[in-house]
Structures are given as structure tokens and as C-alpha cells.
Amino acid sequence: MKFIKKNWQGMLLCIAIAVPSMLLGKQFPVIGGPVIAILAGMVITLFIKEKGKLESGIKFTSKKILQYAVVLLGFGLNLRVILETGRQSLPIIIATISTSLIIAYVLHRAMHIPGKISTLVGVGSSICGGSAIAATAPVIDADDEEVAQAISVIFFFNVLAAVLFPMLGTVLGFSTHSGEGFGIFAGTAVNDTSSVTAAASTWDSMFGLGSATLDKAVTVKLTRTLAIIPITLVLAFIRTRKAEKEAAGQVSLKQVFPFFILFFIGASIITTVALSAGISPEVFTPLKELSKFFIIMAMAAIGLHTNIVKLVRTGGKPILMGMACWVGITAVSLLMQDFLGLW
């Protein structure tokens, strides 16, 4: 009862932003509900001089609801199917993730970009956009403005990819009789699921391939999503080691360990076992939709904690980093496909 009394007003505001954002996101999938929610939150917060009783609920939504969203994301992963059909693209996924993280680290050192923003941009670019940022932010203790900065960068290059990649695919000579080549390209080189879907669906429409490209791209994208697990665990370990040095051993791995990732893994295993036992995948649809809504809610809360003027003023270097990661991932994806004979 105390929890509800403390948080309901802030959470209700986040829900009020999330509902229309979700509906608009379905109408404009290239932009997506999370981006609309974060932008709406940034605009609305300009008119709220004192958050007062709203603050606790907004903070709870941006931190805890975000973690719950990642856990529920696991109910969309059938590990058996991903491992069976995603093995073909696994070398490309490993290469593109490594490329993005290396580029982000090098530019972090060379351009003096804050470490947490660099990590979020590198992980968001290489794994699965907003979902990866959602999973990583609590592990590295990123604040809401850092999350908003990273989401904004990822969004910008998502839109570019969704628009430009189908045209790039025709120029590069991807097969127009099979969706496999372009599907792998979209699944490994586009940041966020919404833009992967948009690019792959466009390719299917252009060449009358039904949903062949989309099916391949989404499977590859889900395989990339599994990289959330090792990345967050490694980051938790690095943060512990760094904190131990700075605080003379007062911080332990247990304090920063991302336990919600264990629940994410558990949700994936439950889904895999249930589907293998013949249970309809539609059973998990409500949980997957709830995950999407929780992410939109959390993005609304993050927007409410973000100074849009400061975000614009400090956005130059992270955008350059995002562009470098995006170009690097695209180039490596194409080179690896060519090397493996998939293109």
C-alpha cells in the first residue's frame, strides 16, 4: 500500500505518455513507440516546474520497470530455433559486435566521450538498439540523460538504415529471388528491431518475396539479442573491478550483478521448453507485448528526467561515434558475408 501511495502518480504520468506513444509507434514503425515516448517526455518535462510527488514513480519506472521489460523480453526468444537457424550468421554477428565495441572504445579514448555514453552507444549499435541499452544501463549505473543520449543516437541511424539499406542492397547486387542475403545483412547491420523489420519488409515488397526476407532478418536479429547476456555480465565484472580500486574493496560483484538477466535467461528457457512441448507461441504474445509497453513506459520516464537543451548541446560527439559504429558494422557485415559466400 505504501509503495502504491508513493509511486502511483509518477507511474500514471508515464502510462499516460506511453499509451499514445505505443499507438503512434504502430502507425510509424520506423520511428517506434520508445522514441516517441522519450521525445514526448522531454517536451512535457519543460512544462513541469516541480515534479514533487511525481518524482518517485518516474524514477521507479525508469529503473525497475526497464528491468522488468528486459525480463519479459526473454519470452520472445525460442533458443532452439535461434540456435538452429542463427548459426549461419553467428560469425558475422560476433564480428559486427566486436567491431562496434572496439570503435566505441577507441573513440571514447580519442574524443574524450564519457565512458557510459560510449558503452551504451557501442552496445546499442551492435546488439539490438533500445533493448540492449535498456539491459546495459542498470549494469553500468547510467543516468537517464545518458540513456536518452544513446537512444537518440541509435534512433537517428535506425531511420537512415531503414530508408537507405534497401536501395543499397539493390546497388550491391543482393539476390532479388531469395531474401536470405539481404535478410542476413539487415539482421546484422541494422540497430533496432523496428528498423530491421522495416528494411526487410521493404525488400520483400520490392521483389514480391512474401515474408522470406523478414523471417530471416528477424531470426538473425534475435540471435544478436542473446549477446545481451555475456555483454552485461562482462560489464558487471568490469564495473566491480573498477569500483573495488576506487573504493578500496567496498564494492562486490553481488552489489552490481545484473540479477534481472538471470530472469531473462529463465524466461527464454521457459519459452523454449514450452514451445518444444507443443504449446502455442500465442500463449507468450501478451508477455511480449507487455515487454514492449514497459520499454515505452520506461522511455517516457527517461524523457521526463532529460534536459532536451543539454541533450542537443552535447550530442555532437556521440552522433559521430554512432555514425562510426554504424558504418563499421555495415562494412564488416558485407565483408563477412562475401567471405562466407552468403552474398
Image (spheres, rainbow, N blue to C red):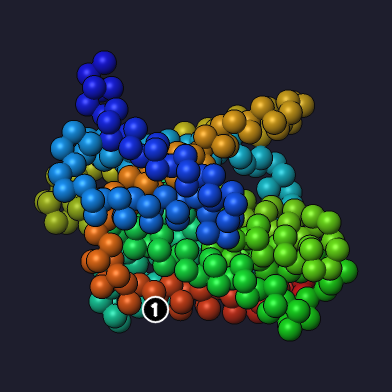
Using residue 239 as the reference point, say whether residue 193 is left or right of it.
Answer: right
Q: Which residue reaches farthest front?
A: 47
Q: Visible in this render: residue 242? A: yes
Name which residue type carries label 1. Leu
Residue drawn at (50%, 50%), measured in percent from left and top?
A: 33
Residue 335, compared with residue 277, is above or below; it is below
Q: Mark 1 sits on what residue?
A: 320
Q: Which residue reaches farthest right?
A: 177
Q: Quadrant of the N terminus?
A: top left
Residue drawn at (75%, 67%), measured in percent from left and top?
A: 203
Residue drawn at (63%, 75%), measured in percent from left and top?
A: 164
Instruction: Report the number of numbered marks.
Output: 1
Q: Quadrant of the C terminus?
A: bottom right
Secondary element at tag 1: helix
Image spot of residue 97 (x, y percent): 52, 65
Using residue 278 as the reference point, say whether residue 39 is left or right of it.
Answer: left
Using residue 93 as the reference point, say whether residue 53 is left or right of it.
Answer: left
Image spot of residue 66 (x, y percent): 39, 41
Image spot of residue 130 (x, y percent): 46, 54
Residue 59, compared with residue 131, is above or below; it is above
Residues 192 and 17: in front is: 17
Q: Visible in this render: residue 341? A: no
